[in-house]
C-alpha cells in the first residue's frame, strides 16, 4: 500500500476512524486543535458523531455516555485540558468503559506553554484522577506510530475494558511524515459489548456505575480491576531496543526524544562509546522486563533517562533496574527540546560518573 | 375492572428516600409515562449525584450513573450515537443548577433531543441540608444557618426562565408535587416531554418542585404546604416554552 503525507494529529484521527471510532468529543486547546477540526469534517462523512463540547469536562463525559452505549469513542486534548478530564477518566475507569483519550502534551505546570513537553508522564501512568486505577498508555515516536498506536489503543481498551491513552508530545502532533494507513475495519468485526447500556430491547437491563457504596463490594471491584492491570502487565509490555546488546551506556526515552536519543547513540558509537537505547512503547504497563534484561548484562555500566520533564519516567527506570546499575537523568523542560550534542555529553558524563562511583 | 399496579418501569428495589419526600412520586410519574408510551425497552436513563444517585437501581431500563453535574453531557454522548433511543436524565438542583450549570445550559443550547427531569427541592438533601442554588431567600440551610441572605449568598436561580432565553429548547415547563392536582399535572408534563423526545422534536425540560421535610425540618404535611405557598412564589409554575403550541 502506498504512503501518504500526514500531520501527526491527522494520523491519530485516521488510526481511530480505521479501527471503528464513530464518536469524537473535543474542545479547542493548542497544540491539538487539528484533531477536533479533522474529526468535525470526517465523522459526518462516515456516519459518526462529532460534538464540540462546552468544556474538557463535558467532552470526557460525552465519551462516558457514548462509549458506555457501546460505541468506540475518543476525546483529545493537551495537558491543562487533560487535567480537567481526570474526574471523568476516574469514573470511566471504575465503570470499566473502554475508550481512547489523546494527550498531545505541552509544557506545564499551570497554563504553561504550548511547546512540546513530557511533564504529564506521572499523570498518565499513575492514574491521574482519584482512586486506584490505571490507563493503558501508548507513546508514539513517529507519525506512523501515532496512527498505528491509536488504532491498537481501541482494541486494547475493548479487550480489557480499560481506558487507553495516547501520550504524545506536541512535536509528534505537529510533525508531517509519510504514513501507510491501515485498512478501514469492518464495524461488524468488532466484538459485541454485552455490558453496553444501549437500550436493552428486552434483554436483561444493564447498568454502568462507579458508585459502590458498600466497602465489601467496592474492595472486590477494585481488586478485580487490579487483576486486569496485572493481566495487562503480563501481556502488553512493549519496548524497542537499539544497539543495547553490547552497550555500556543504555539511554532511554519515549516519543520525540527517543528519536534524538537514537541519533545521539549513533554519534556516540561514531565517537567510540558503546551506547544503546531502550524506547518504551507502552508507558503503562512499563516494560520493566526490557530494562531488567539490559541491567543483567555485564557490559551495561549505566542507564540514562532523557525526558522533556524534570525526571518522571526515570523513577520507573530505577524501579525496573532495581539497583543493579546506576540510573542517571537528563531533561529539558518549559518547551525546550535537547540537542543531540547535549544528550551525547550527558551520556559521556553518566558513564564517567558510573566508572568513578564503582 | 382496572386494578392499580406498580409500573414495570420501576424495579422492586426498596426506595431509600426519606419519609415525606416526593422524589418517589416523581420516579413513578417518569416510569409510568415511559411505560404508557411503550418506550421501556429503548430507554436509557442517566442518574445524577445527589439524593437520586441510586436511581439506576429503581428505573427498570439501561442506566448510566454520571459524575456530579455531568448527566446532560453523558446523555448527549448516548443520544447522538443512538438517536432512536429514549434518553432521559434525572437531576437535582445542586447537580443541575450549580456544579452542572455549564452542561445544563449547553445541552439545551445545542438542542440535544433528550428529556431532563429537574428535581428542585431548594436544598442539598443527600449531603445533609446545605444551601442550594435554588434555596429561597430567608430559607435556612446548614451553610446559611440564619437563612439565605441575598447580600451574602445571592439569589435563587430560576432555571426554566434561564433556559427559556435560548432558542433551541422545544419544551420547558415547571410543575409541582405539593398536592394531587399538581401531581397529575406533573405527570402530564413529564409524559408530554418524553413523547416530544420520542417524536424527535428537540430538547425537553421539566422542572418538578419536590419537598424535603428532613432538611427543611418540617413535618411532611407542612413541607407540602410550604411548597405550595412559598416555593411556587419564587418558582412560578407554568409552561415556558412549547413549540408544539407556538409558545416561543
Image: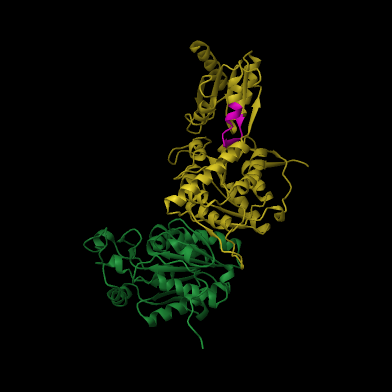
Chain colours: A yellow, B green
Q: Is residue A327 visible?
A: yes
- The answer to whether A356 is drawn above or below residue A172 in the figure is above
- Residue A295, given in percent of the width and then of the height, sits at 58, 21
- Residue A4, given in percent of the width and then of the height, sits at 73, 42
Seen at 49% across and 48% down, the residue is: A220
Between residue B194 and residue A345, name the one nearer to us: B194
As drawn, which residue projects farthest toward the left?
B146
Would residue A45 be found to the left or right of residue A301 on screen? Answer: right
- Residue A236, given in percent of the width and then of the height, sits at 62, 38
Total marks placed = 0
Between residue A310 and residue A244, name the one nearer to us: A244
Between residue B180 and residue A340, name the one nearer to us: B180
Between residue B26 and residue A345, name the one nearer to us: B26
As drawn, which residue projects farthest toward the right?
A1
Quadrant in the rendering for residue A153: top right
Seen at 60% across and 46% down, the residue is: A160
- Residue B116, given in percent of the width and then of the height, sits at 47, 68
**Residue B205 part of the magenta-drawn span:** no
As drawn, which residue projects farthest toward the front?
A216
- The answer to whether B132 is drawn above or below residue B234 in the figure is above
Q: Is residue A31 visible?
A: no
Quadrant in the rendering for residue B161: bottom left
**Residue A285 part of the magenta-drawn span:** yes
Would residue B122 be found to the left or right of residue B70 on screen? Answer: left
Seen at 45% across and 45% down, the residue is: A131
Q: Which residues are magenta?
A: A279-291
Would residue B53 be found to the left or right of residue B140 on screen? Answer: right
Amino acid at each position: 500500500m502506498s504512503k501518504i503525507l500526514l500531520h501527526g494529529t491527522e494520523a491519530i484521527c485516521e488510526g481511530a476512524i480505521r479501527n471503528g471510532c464513530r464518536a469524537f468529543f473535543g474542545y479547542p486547546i493548542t497544540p491539538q486543535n487539528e484533531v477536533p477540526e479533522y474529526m468535525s469534517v470526517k465523522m459526518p462523512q462516515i456516519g459518526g458523531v462529532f460534538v464540540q463540547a462546552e468544556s474538557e469536562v463535558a467532552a470526557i463525559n460525552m465519551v462516558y455516555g457514548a462509549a458506555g452505549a457501546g460505541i468506540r469513542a475518543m476525546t483529545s486534548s493537551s495537558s491543562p485540558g487533560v487535567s480537567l478530564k481526570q474526574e471523568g477518566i476516574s469514573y470511566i475507569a471504575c465503570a470499566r468503559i473502554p475508550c481512547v483519550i489523546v494527550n498531545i502534551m505541552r509544557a506545564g505546570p499551570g497554563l504553561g506553554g504550548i511547546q512540546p513537553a513530557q511533564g504529564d508522564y506521572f499523570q498518565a501512568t499513575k492514574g491521574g484522577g482519584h482512586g486506584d486505577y490505571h490507563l493503558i498508555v501508548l507513546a508514539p515516536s513517529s507519525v506512523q506510530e501515532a496512527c498505528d498506536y491509536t488504532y491498537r489503543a481501541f482494541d486494547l481498551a475493548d479487550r480489557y475494558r480499560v481506558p487507553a491513552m495516547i501520550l504524545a508530545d506536541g512535536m509528534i502532533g505537529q510533525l508531517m511524515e509519510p504514513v501507510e494507513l491501515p485498512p478501514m475495519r469492518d464495524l461488524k468485526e468488532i466484538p459485541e459489548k454485552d455490558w453496553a447500556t444501549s437500550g436493552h430491547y428486552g434483554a436483561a437491563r444493564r447498568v454502568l456505575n462507579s458508585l459502590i457504596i458498600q466497602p465489601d463490594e467496592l474492595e472486590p471491584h477494585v481488586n478485580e480491576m487490579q487483576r486486569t492491570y496485572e493481566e495487562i502487565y503480563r501481556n502488553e509490555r512493549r519496548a524497542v531496543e537499539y544497539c543495547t546488546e553490547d552497550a555500556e551506556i543504555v539511554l532511554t526515552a519515549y516519543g520525540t526524544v527517543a528519536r534524538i536519543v537514537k541519533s545521539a547513540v549513533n554519534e556516540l558509537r561514531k565517537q567510540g562509546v558503546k551506547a544503546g537505547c531502550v524506547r518504551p512503547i507502552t508507558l503503562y504497563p512499563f516494560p520493566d522486563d526490557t530494562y531488567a534484561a539490559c541491567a543483567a548484562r555485564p557490559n551495561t555500566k549505566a542507564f540514562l533517562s532523557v525526558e522533556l520533564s524534570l525526571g518522571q519516567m526515570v523513577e520507573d527506570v530505577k524501579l525496573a533496574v532495581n539497583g543493579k546499575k546506576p540510573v542517571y537523568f537528563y531533561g529539558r523542560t518549559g518547551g525546550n527540546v535537547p540537542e543531540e550534542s547535549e544528550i551525547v555529553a550527558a551520556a559521556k558524563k553518566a558513564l564517567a560518573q558510573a566508572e568513578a562511583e564503582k | 375492572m382496572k386494578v392499580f399496579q406498580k409500573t414495570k418501569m420501576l424495579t422492586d428495589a426498596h426506595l431509600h428516600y426519606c419519609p415525606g419526600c416526593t422524589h418517589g412520586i416523581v420516579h413513578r410519574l417518569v416510569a409510568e409515562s415511559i411505560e404508557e408510551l411503550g418506550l421501556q425497552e429503548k430507554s436509557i436513563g442517566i442518574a445524577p449525584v445527589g439524593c437520586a444517585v441510586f436511581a439506576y437501581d429503581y428505573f427498570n431500563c439501561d442506566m448510566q450513573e454520571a459524575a456530579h453535574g455531568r448527566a446532560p453531557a453523558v446523555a448527549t454522548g448516548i443520544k447522538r450515537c443512538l438517536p432512536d433511543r429514549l434518553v432521559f436524565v434525572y437531576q437535582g438542583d445542586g447537580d443541575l443548577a450549580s456544579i452542572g450549570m455549564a452542561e445544563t445550559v449547553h445541552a439545551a443550547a445545542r438542542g440535544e433531543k433528550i428529556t431532563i427531569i429537574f428535581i428542585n427541592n431548594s436544598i442539598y438533601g443527600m449531603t445533609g441540608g446545605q444551601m442550594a442554588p435554588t434555596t429561597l431567600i430567608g430559607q435556612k440551610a446548614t451553610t446559611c444557618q440564619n437563612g439565605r441572605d441575598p447580600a451574602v449568598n445571592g439569589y435563587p436561580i430560576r432555571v426554566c426562565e434561564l433556559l427559556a432565553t435560548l432558542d433551541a429548547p422545544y419544551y420547558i415547563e415547571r410543575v409541582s408535587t405539593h398536592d394531587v392536582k399538581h401531581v397529575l399535572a406533573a405527570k402530564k408534563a413529564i409524559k408530554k416531554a418524553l413523547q416530544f423526545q420520542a417524536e424527535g422534536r428537540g430538547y425537553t425540560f421539566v422542572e418538578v418542585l419536590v419537598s424535603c421535610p428532613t432538611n427543611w425540618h418540617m413535618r411532611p404535611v407542612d413541607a407540602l404546604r410550604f411548597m405550595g405557598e412559598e416555593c411556587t412564589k419564587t418558582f412560578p409554575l407554568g409552561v415556558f416554552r412549547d413549540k408544539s403550541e407556538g409558545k416561543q
